[in-house]
Amino acid sequence: MIRLDRVEKRYAGSADPAVEELTLDIPTGEVLVLVGPSGCGKSTTLRLINRMIEPTGGRIYFGGEDVTDVNPDALRRRIGYVIQQIGLFPHRTIAENVATVPKLLGWPKAKIGPRVDELLDMVGLDPSEFAKRYPKELSGGQAQRVGVARALGADPEVLLMDEPFGAIDPITRDRLQNEFLRLQADLRKTIVFVTHDVDEAIKMGDRIAILGDRSRLAQLDTPERILALPANDFVSDFIGSGSTLKGLHFERVRNVELADFPVASVSTPRDQALASLSASDEKWLLVLDEETRPVRWVNEAHLARTDEPLTSLGAPVVSKVEPQATLHDALEEMLSSNAGSAVVVDGKGRYQGVVAAETLTGAVAAMRADAKRHYEELAAEEKVAADLAAGEARL
């Protein structure tokens, strides 16, 4: 959908370019996040894409069409744009703000009204309550939702977002991020998203472009692969410590092999439960109720007591996850578990298996192996291409 071909921006009087021969391909329906240190050229790159500032070199393509020389106003009407400061017109109602681009494009009133209502409803704002309000009557989170609705006004193919949630408190920010991801699952827009926050980049991006000085690409790949195998020290330092733990957000419990702990029913005789535990390599036994729902963790010392029922021994099972949870969720539950494991249950609370520490280390190893294999394949493809080019040159 979008291609930047050696795009450059050089300001008069500056020895170095702000953006230096940047080449990027952004497929249709992808969210590409540009992230990097302050001053690296992230926002400049975004403004080059919709030509709010003009490139001094290179070409920009939309859907295969070179738009470097077309009318920039016409280009911008094909692109939705969301910024941190929102930029709503204070003297216009919310409905009038959302209708800005459709009006510029000459849409009939009969089409604009329903579109405004549809968009406000889409971003979680009741049109009957918000359409006639003015921006000063909105909270920060509500105003940001209106900004997104306005950007989607004429149903653009491309959406550019420049730190759209950066000025909002963490709780509202998390809600808006989740709401936007829900919308994107339905709309499948092509989105270029700028942020300085690595965690936001990991959450929002299908791919992440980590930019160094002058918007030079340090690494471009999926969040999983970047976290599993940073390309160099710059990337490693930028994503910070704990990258392995962040990578656990991308793997679901349902996709890993669960450990099979020794179990017993609440009605199992104590000697049988002790025999089951002794026959395993585990230190804990899981007690299930008559509906196979986990209720207690017990160990050998608990089972060696007198005739107390299993339901009164050990510790209650409080660390449970469902199959759709992430491995990061499972890790958090494991840290609060008496047995150091997270019990997996289905939607009705019935026992499915256990996520053990070995499961997490195995998942991390698999992610690293996948990333390494991917980069080795890329290197091999590049070598083949280089050999072919060298052969053609000799001919």
Image (cartoon, helix red, strand yellow):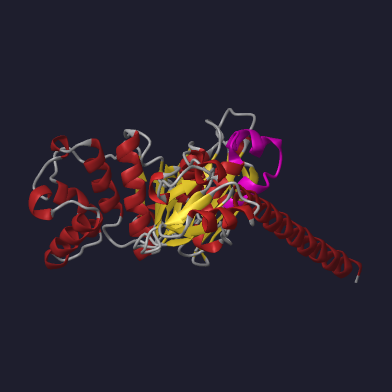
- Residue 24: x %, y % from top left: 59, 54
Give the answer, above or below, for where 22 lies relative to 241: below
Q: Is residue 16 left or right of residue 341?
A: right
Residue positioned 77% across, 61% down in the render: 382
Q: As rendered, which of 371 and 253 lies closer to the eye?
A: 253
Main SS of the magenta part reads: helix
Q: Is residue 68 left or right of residue 139?
A: right
Residue 23 seen: no
Residue positioned 64% across, 39% down in the render: 235
- Residue 315: x %, y % from top left: 43, 42
Is 72 in the magenta? no
Task: Tell me how many marks there are.
Answer: 0
Residue 264 seen: yes
Task: Please state, as top left, top right, bottom left or bottom right, where the C terminus lies in the image.
Answer: bottom right
- The magenta segment: 224-243
Residue positioned 67% across, 35% down in the render: 234
Q: Residue furthest front?
A: 306
To which quarter of the image does residue 169 belong?
top left
Residue positioned 49% across, 66% down in the render: 63
- Residue 373: x %, y % from top left: 73, 59
Q: As rendered, which of 305 and 223 lies closer to the eye?
A: 305
Q: Residue furthest right?
A: 394
Q: As rendered, which of 173 and 105 lies closer to the eye?
A: 173
- Residue 210: x %, y % from top left: 59, 43
